[in-house]
Protein backbone atom coordinates (compact mmCIF):
# COMPACT_ATOMS: atom_id res chain seq x y z
CA UNK A 1 0.00 0.00 0.00
CA UNK A 2 1.50 3.31 -1.11
CA UNK A 3 1.96 5.94 1.59
CA UNK A 4 0.53 9.41 1.15
CA UNK A 5 0.05 12.58 3.14
CA UNK A 6 -2.96 12.08 5.40
CA UNK A 7 -5.51 14.81 5.92
CA UNK A 8 -7.31 14.78 9.28
CA UNK A 9 -10.54 15.38 7.40
CA UNK A 10 -10.05 12.02 5.65
CA UNK A 11 -9.64 10.17 8.94
CA UNK A 12 -12.68 8.61 10.60
CA UNK A 13 -11.84 8.72 14.29
CA UNK A 14 -14.36 5.96 15.01
CA UNK A 15 -12.15 3.60 12.99
CA UNK A 16 -9.55 3.81 15.76
CA UNK A 17 -11.97 1.96 18.05
CA UNK A 18 -12.02 -0.93 15.60
CA UNK A 19 -8.25 -0.78 15.20
CA UNK A 20 -7.75 -1.07 18.98
CA UNK A 21 -10.00 -4.11 19.34
CA UNK A 22 -8.36 -5.95 16.44
CA UNK A 23 -4.90 -5.11 17.79
CA UNK A 24 -5.85 -6.50 21.21
CA UNK A 25 -7.67 -9.64 20.08
CA UNK A 26 -5.68 -10.29 16.86
CA UNK A 27 -8.89 -11.59 15.31
CA UNK A 28 -11.52 -9.63 13.41
CA UNK A 29 -14.17 -12.12 14.58
CA UNK A 30 -13.25 -11.59 18.25
CA UNK A 31 -13.19 -7.82 17.79
CA UNK A 32 -16.61 -8.02 16.14
CA UNK A 33 -18.06 -9.82 19.17
CA UNK A 34 -16.63 -7.26 21.59
CA UNK A 35 -17.98 -4.39 19.49
CA UNK A 36 -21.35 -6.07 18.82
CA UNK A 37 -20.98 -5.81 15.03
CA UNK A 38 -20.36 -8.35 12.27
CA UNK A 39 -17.01 -9.46 10.85
CA UNK A 40 -17.56 -7.56 7.59
CA UNK A 41 -17.94 -4.26 9.45
CA UNK A 42 -14.65 -4.74 11.28
CA UNK A 43 -12.80 -5.67 8.10
CA UNK A 44 -14.25 -2.68 6.26
CA UNK A 45 -13.31 -0.27 9.07
CA UNK A 46 -9.73 -1.51 9.19
CA UNK A 47 -9.41 -1.17 5.42
CA UNK A 48 -10.85 2.36 5.66
CA UNK A 49 -8.30 3.36 8.31
CA UNK A 50 -5.40 1.87 6.34
CA UNK A 51 -6.57 3.73 3.23
CA UNK A 52 -6.87 7.04 5.13
CA UNK A 53 -3.39 6.63 6.62
CA UNK A 54 -1.89 5.29 3.42
CA UNK A 55 -0.17 2.38 5.15
CA UNK A 56 -0.67 -1.24 6.09
CA UNK A 57 -1.48 -1.67 9.80
CA UNK A 58 -1.86 -5.45 9.97
CA UNK A 59 -0.35 -8.52 8.35
CA UNK A 60 -3.22 -10.97 7.92
CA UNK A 61 -2.98 -14.76 7.84
CA UNK A 62 -5.18 -17.78 8.59
CA UNK A 63 -2.77 -19.12 11.22
CA UNK A 64 -1.63 -15.96 13.04
CA UNK A 65 -4.67 -13.75 12.53
CA UNK A 66 -4.07 -9.99 12.48
CA UNK A 67 -0.47 -9.12 13.41
CA UNK A 68 0.54 -5.49 13.79
CA UNK A 69 3.04 -4.13 11.28
CA UNK A 70 5.71 -1.70 12.55
CA UNK A 71 3.42 1.16 11.46
CA UNK A 72 0.48 -0.45 13.27
CA UNK A 73 2.58 -0.86 16.41
CA UNK A 74 3.43 2.84 16.37
CA UNK A 75 -0.22 3.79 15.87
CA UNK A 76 -1.27 1.56 18.79
CA UNK A 77 0.44 3.76 21.38
CA UNK A 78 -1.18 6.92 20.03
CA UNK A 79 -4.60 5.28 19.73
CA UNK A 80 -4.49 4.06 23.34
CA UNK A 81 -3.54 7.56 24.50
CA UNK A 82 -6.51 9.00 22.58
CA UNK A 83 -8.81 6.39 24.13
CA UNK A 84 -7.63 7.16 27.68
CA UNK A 85 -7.85 10.91 27.11
CA UNK A 86 -11.45 10.54 25.93
CA UNK A 87 -12.34 8.50 29.01
CA UNK A 88 -10.89 11.16 31.32
CA UNK A 89 -12.46 14.00 29.33
CA UNK A 90 -15.90 12.41 29.69
CA UNK A 91 -15.42 12.16 33.44
CA UNK A 92 -14.25 15.77 33.75
CA UNK A 93 -17.05 17.37 31.75
CA UNK A 94 -19.94 15.06 32.60
CA UNK A 95 -20.03 15.43 36.38
CA UNK A 96 -19.74 12.97 39.25
CA UNK A 97 -22.74 10.89 38.15
CA UNK A 98 -20.95 9.77 35.01
CA UNK A 99 -17.64 9.48 36.89
CA UNK A 100 -19.27 6.90 39.16
CA UNK A 101 -20.47 4.80 36.24
CA UNK A 102 -18.92 2.71 33.52
CA UNK A 103 -17.32 -0.68 33.19
CA UNK A 104 -14.21 -2.23 34.80
CA UNK A 105 -12.66 -5.61 34.05
CA UNK A 106 -10.49 -7.19 36.74
CA UNK A 107 -8.18 -10.15 36.17
CA UNK A 108 -7.06 -12.23 39.13
CA UNK A 109 -5.56 -15.56 40.08
CA UNK A 110 -8.14 -18.32 40.19
CA UNK A 111 -8.43 -19.09 43.90
CA UNK A 112 -8.13 -15.51 45.18
CA UNK A 113 -10.46 -14.25 42.47
CA UNK A 114 -13.14 -16.86 43.11
CA UNK A 115 -13.08 -17.12 46.90
CA UNK A 116 -12.04 -13.62 48.02
CA UNK A 117 -12.36 -10.97 45.31
CA UNK A 118 -15.73 -12.08 43.91
CA UNK A 119 -17.56 -11.98 47.28
CA UNK A 120 -16.07 -8.54 47.94
CA UNK A 121 -17.09 -7.23 44.52
CA UNK A 122 -20.69 -8.28 45.10
CA UNK A 123 -20.74 -5.69 47.90
CA UNK A 124 -18.94 -3.09 45.78
CA UNK A 125 -21.53 -3.19 42.98
CA UNK A 126 -24.33 -2.88 45.55
CA UNK A 127 -22.86 0.49 46.53
CA UNK A 128 -22.06 1.56 42.94
CA UNK A 129 -24.86 0.02 40.81
CA UNK A 130 -23.88 2.17 37.81
CA UNK A 131 -20.40 0.59 37.71
CA UNK A 132 -20.40 -2.87 36.15
CA UNK A 133 -17.48 -5.19 36.91
CA UNK A 134 -16.18 -8.26 35.09
CA UNK A 135 -14.07 -10.58 37.26
CA UNK A 136 -11.74 -12.99 35.45
CA UNK A 137 -10.47 -15.56 38.00
CA UNK A 138 -8.21 -17.54 35.68
CA UNK A 139 -5.31 -19.99 36.23
CA UNK A 140 -3.06 -18.18 33.76
CA UNK A 141 -1.44 -14.81 33.10
CA UNK A 142 -3.73 -11.95 32.03
CA UNK A 143 -2.33 -9.29 29.70
CA UNK A 144 -2.85 -5.59 30.34
CA UNK A 145 -1.08 -4.65 27.12
CA UNK A 146 -3.85 -6.41 25.16
CA UNK A 147 -6.46 -4.81 27.44
CA UNK A 148 -7.74 -8.23 28.58
CA UNK A 149 -8.34 -6.46 31.90
CA UNK A 150 -8.17 -2.96 33.39
CA UNK A 151 -6.79 -4.08 36.77
CA UNK A 152 -4.81 -7.25 37.44
CA UNK A 153 -4.01 -9.04 40.71
CA UNK A 154 -1.09 -11.41 40.19
CA UNK A 155 1.53 -13.46 42.03
CA UNK A 156 4.41 -11.52 40.56
CA UNK A 157 5.16 -7.84 40.10
CA UNK A 158 5.38 -6.81 36.42
CA UNK A 159 8.99 -6.33 35.40
CA UNK A 160 8.34 -3.52 32.95
CA UNK A 161 5.57 -1.59 31.25
CA UNK A 162 3.57 1.62 31.72
CA UNK A 163 1.92 0.36 34.90
CA UNK A 164 1.03 1.62 38.36
CA UNK A 165 1.73 -1.22 40.77
CA UNK A 166 1.41 -1.88 44.50
CA UNK A 167 1.93 -4.84 46.77
CA UNK A 168 -1.59 -5.83 47.75
CA UNK A 169 -0.85 -8.28 50.58
CA UNK A 170 1.03 -11.27 51.90
CA UNK A 171 -0.86 -14.53 52.14
CA UNK A 172 0.00 -17.82 53.78
CA UNK A 173 -0.17 -21.40 52.52
CA UNK A 174 -0.19 -24.47 54.74
CA UNK A 175 -0.61 -28.20 54.40
CA UNK A 176 -4.20 -29.41 54.83
CA UNK A 177 -6.07 -32.68 55.23
CA UNK A 178 -9.44 -33.84 56.47
CA UNK A 179 -9.81 -35.60 59.82
CA UNK A 180 -11.01 -38.67 57.94
CA UNK A 181 -7.74 -38.74 55.98
CA UNK A 182 -5.65 -38.37 59.13
CA UNK A 183 -7.59 -41.18 60.84
CA UNK A 184 -7.04 -43.64 57.98
CA UNK A 185 -3.37 -42.99 57.18
CA UNK A 186 -0.06 -43.27 59.04
CA UNK A 187 0.43 -40.56 61.70
CA UNK A 188 2.20 -37.35 60.70
CA UNK A 189 4.43 -36.15 63.53
CA UNK A 190 7.22 -34.51 61.55
CA UNK A 191 8.00 -33.47 57.98
CA UNK A 192 9.88 -36.71 57.23
CA UNK A 193 6.64 -38.67 57.72
CA UNK A 194 5.10 -36.91 54.72
CA UNK A 195 7.03 -39.03 52.22
CA UNK A 196 4.62 -41.89 52.99
CA UNK A 197 1.57 -39.83 52.00
CA UNK A 198 -0.06 -38.95 48.65
CA UNK A 199 -0.42 -35.31 47.60
CA UNK A 200 -2.34 -33.35 45.05
CA UNK A 201 -0.34 -30.56 43.44
CA UNK A 202 0.22 -28.53 40.26
CA UNK A 203 1.22 -29.90 36.87
CA UNK A 204 4.77 -28.59 36.95
CA UNK A 205 5.29 -27.90 33.26
CA UNK A 206 1.89 -26.17 32.96
CA UNK A 207 2.10 -23.90 36.02
CA UNK A 208 1.79 -20.28 34.89
CA UNK A 209 4.12 -19.01 37.63
CA UNK A 210 7.22 -20.44 39.30
CA UNK A 211 5.71 -19.19 42.58
CA UNK A 212 3.35 -22.19 42.44
CA UNK A 213 6.05 -24.86 42.29
CA UNK A 214 6.59 -25.24 46.01
CA UNK A 215 5.79 -28.89 46.77
CA UNK A 216 9.21 -30.30 45.80
CA UNK A 217 10.96 -27.66 47.93
CA UNK A 218 8.69 -28.00 50.95
CA UNK A 219 8.43 -31.80 50.92
CA UNK A 220 11.42 -33.30 49.05
CA UNK A 221 10.49 -36.64 47.56
CA UNK A 222 6.74 -36.01 47.86
CA UNK A 223 4.52 -38.13 45.63
CA UNK A 224 1.78 -36.22 43.82
CA UNK A 225 -0.63 -38.96 42.75
CA UNK A 226 -3.07 -36.38 41.38
CA UNK A 227 -2.11 -33.12 39.71
CA UNK A 228 -4.09 -30.20 38.34
CA UNK A 229 -3.50 -26.75 36.85
CA UNK A 230 -6.35 -25.50 39.05
CA UNK A 231 -5.97 -24.67 42.75
CA UNK A 232 -9.74 -25.01 43.11
CA UNK A 233 -9.52 -28.57 41.76
CA UNK A 234 -6.82 -29.27 44.36
CA UNK A 235 -9.09 -27.82 47.06
CA UNK A 236 -11.98 -30.04 45.97
CA UNK A 237 -9.73 -33.12 45.85
CA UNK A 238 -8.46 -32.44 49.38
CA UNK A 239 -12.08 -32.28 50.56
CA UNK A 240 -12.51 -35.91 49.47
CA UNK A 241 -10.13 -37.06 52.21
CA UNK A 242 -7.80 -39.07 50.00
CA UNK A 243 -4.72 -36.87 49.77
CA UNK A 244 -2.85 -33.94 51.30
CA UNK A 245 -2.69 -30.53 49.65
CA UNK A 246 -0.75 -27.31 50.17
CA UNK A 247 -3.42 -24.63 49.90
CA UNK A 248 -3.79 -20.90 50.56
CA UNK A 249 -5.28 -20.45 54.02
CA UNK A 250 -8.02 -18.16 52.68
CA UNK A 251 -9.13 -21.01 50.40
CA UNK A 252 -8.95 -23.83 52.97
CA UNK A 253 -10.87 -21.59 55.39
CA UNK A 254 -13.97 -22.08 53.25
CA UNK A 255 -14.31 -25.66 54.56
CA UNK A 256 -13.96 -26.38 58.30
CA UNK A 257 -13.28 -30.05 57.47
CA UNK A 258 -9.82 -29.11 56.21
CA UNK A 259 -7.31 -29.05 59.07
CA UNK A 260 -3.76 -27.68 59.03
CA UNK A 261 -1.04 -30.34 59.23
CA UNK A 262 2.34 -29.48 60.80
CA UNK A 263 1.46 -25.76 60.67
CA UNK A 264 4.70 -24.74 62.38
CA UNK A 265 6.84 -26.66 59.86
CA UNK A 266 4.88 -26.43 56.59
CA UNK A 267 4.29 -22.73 56.30
CA UNK A 268 4.77 -20.60 53.16
CA UNK A 269 4.26 -16.90 52.48
CA UNK A 270 3.54 -15.48 49.04
CA UNK A 271 2.43 -12.07 47.79
CA UNK A 272 -0.29 -10.63 45.62
CA UNK A 273 0.47 -7.59 43.48
CA UNK A 274 -2.14 -5.28 41.97
CA UNK A 275 -1.47 -3.16 38.93
CA UNK A 276 -3.10 -1.28 36.08
CA UNK A 277 -2.04 0.89 33.16
CA UNK A 278 -0.88 4.40 34.04
CA UNK A 279 -3.33 5.95 31.58
CA UNK A 280 -6.29 4.30 33.35
CA UNK A 281 -5.29 4.85 36.97
CA UNK A 282 -6.80 8.36 37.15
CA UNK A 283 -10.23 7.26 35.98
CA UNK A 284 -12.66 7.61 38.88
CA UNK A 285 -14.17 4.14 38.56
CA UNK A 286 -10.69 2.57 38.49
CA UNK A 287 -9.65 4.58 41.56
CA UNK A 288 -12.78 3.57 43.48
CA UNK A 289 -12.30 -0.13 42.80
CA UNK A 290 -8.53 0.02 43.40
CA UNK A 291 -8.98 1.68 46.81
CA UNK A 292 -11.82 -0.65 47.75
CA UNK A 293 -9.78 -3.78 47.01
CA UNK A 294 -6.90 -2.43 49.10
CA UNK A 295 -9.28 -1.63 51.97
CA UNK A 296 -10.98 -5.05 52.12
CA UNK A 297 -7.68 -6.88 51.71
CA UNK A 298 -6.21 -5.04 54.68
CA UNK A 299 -9.42 -5.72 56.63
CA UNK A 300 -8.97 -9.45 55.98
CA UNK A 301 -5.26 -9.71 56.79
CA UNK A 302 -5.94 -12.29 59.57
CA UNK A 303 -7.79 -14.53 57.09
CA UNK A 304 -4.99 -14.25 54.54
CA UNK A 305 -2.43 -15.12 57.22
CA UNK A 306 -4.40 -18.18 58.31
CA UNK A 307 -5.25 -16.75 61.73
CA UNK A 308 -9.04 -16.89 61.27
CA UNK A 309 -11.64 -18.47 59.02
CA UNK A 310 -13.87 -15.39 58.98
CA UNK A 311 -14.31 -13.42 55.76
CA UNK A 312 -15.06 -9.76 56.52
CA UNK A 313 -16.73 -7.10 54.39
CA UNK A 314 -16.29 -3.35 54.52
CA UNK A 315 -19.24 -1.32 55.77
CA UNK A 316 -19.03 0.81 52.67
CA UNK A 317 -16.37 1.49 50.02
CA UNK A 318 -13.90 4.30 50.56
CA UNK A 319 -15.39 7.72 49.98
CA UNK A 320 -18.97 6.60 50.67
CA UNK A 321 -20.81 7.59 53.80
CA UNK A 322 -22.46 4.68 55.65
Image: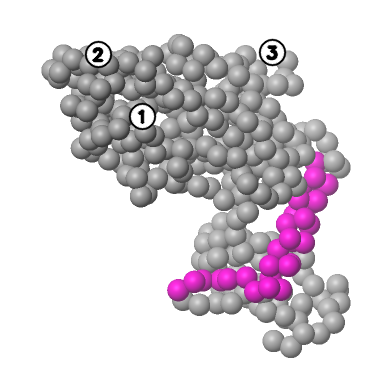
Q: Is residue 106 magenta?
A: no
- Residue 45, numbered circle: none
User: Whole-Å distance between the Cαs marked 2 and 1?
Assistant: 16 Å
The crowding category of the residue bearing disc 1, from other C-alpha atoms within 10 Å (few below 14, some 14 to 19, many at least 20), is some
Q: N-terminal of the two: label 2 or label 1? A: 2
| Residue at figure coordinates x 69%, y 45% from the top left | 163
Q: Which residue is mark 2?
A: 189
| Residue at figure coordinates x 31%, y 29% from the top left | 219
Q: Secondary structure at mark 1?
A: helix
- Residue 322, numbered circle: 3
Question: Which residue is more in the foreground, 186 or 6?
Answer: 186
Contact check, label 1 and label 3, Cβ < 8 Å = no
Vertical side of 171 occupied by 286: above or below: below
User: Whole-Å distance between the Cαs marked 1 and 3?
Assistant: 45 Å
The crowding category of the residue bearing disc 3, from other C-alpha atoms within 10 Å (few below 14, some 14 to 19, many at least 20), is few
Question: Which residue is more in the foreground, 106 or 127?
Answer: 106
Does residue 158 appear to the left or right of 4 in the view shown?
A: left
The crowding category of the residue bearing disc 2, from other C-alpha atoms within 10 Å (few below 14, some 14 to 19, many at least 20), is few
Q: Specify the quadrant that holds the C terminus.
A: top right
Q: Main secondary structure of the magenta part?
A: helix
User: Whole-Å distance between the Cαs marked 3 and 2?
Assistant: 50 Å
> Does residue 204 appear in the picture of this structure?
yes
Which range is magenta? 63-91
Q: State the image quarter where residue 243 is shown.
A: top left
Q: Which residue is mark 1?
A: 218
Counting from the top left corner in percent of width and height, residue 82 is at 78, 57
| Residue at figure coordinates x 80%, y 51% from the top left | 85
Vertical side of 80 occupied by 122: above or below: above
Amino acid sequence: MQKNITSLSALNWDDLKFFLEVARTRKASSAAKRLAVDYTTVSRRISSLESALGTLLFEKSRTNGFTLTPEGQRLLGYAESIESTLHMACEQVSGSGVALSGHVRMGCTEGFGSFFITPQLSHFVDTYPAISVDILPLPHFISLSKREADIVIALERPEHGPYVCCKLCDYRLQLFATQDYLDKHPPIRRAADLQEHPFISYVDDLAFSSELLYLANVVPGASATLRSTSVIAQFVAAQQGRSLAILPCFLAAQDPRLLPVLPNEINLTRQFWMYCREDLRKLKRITLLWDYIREVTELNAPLLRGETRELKFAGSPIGVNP
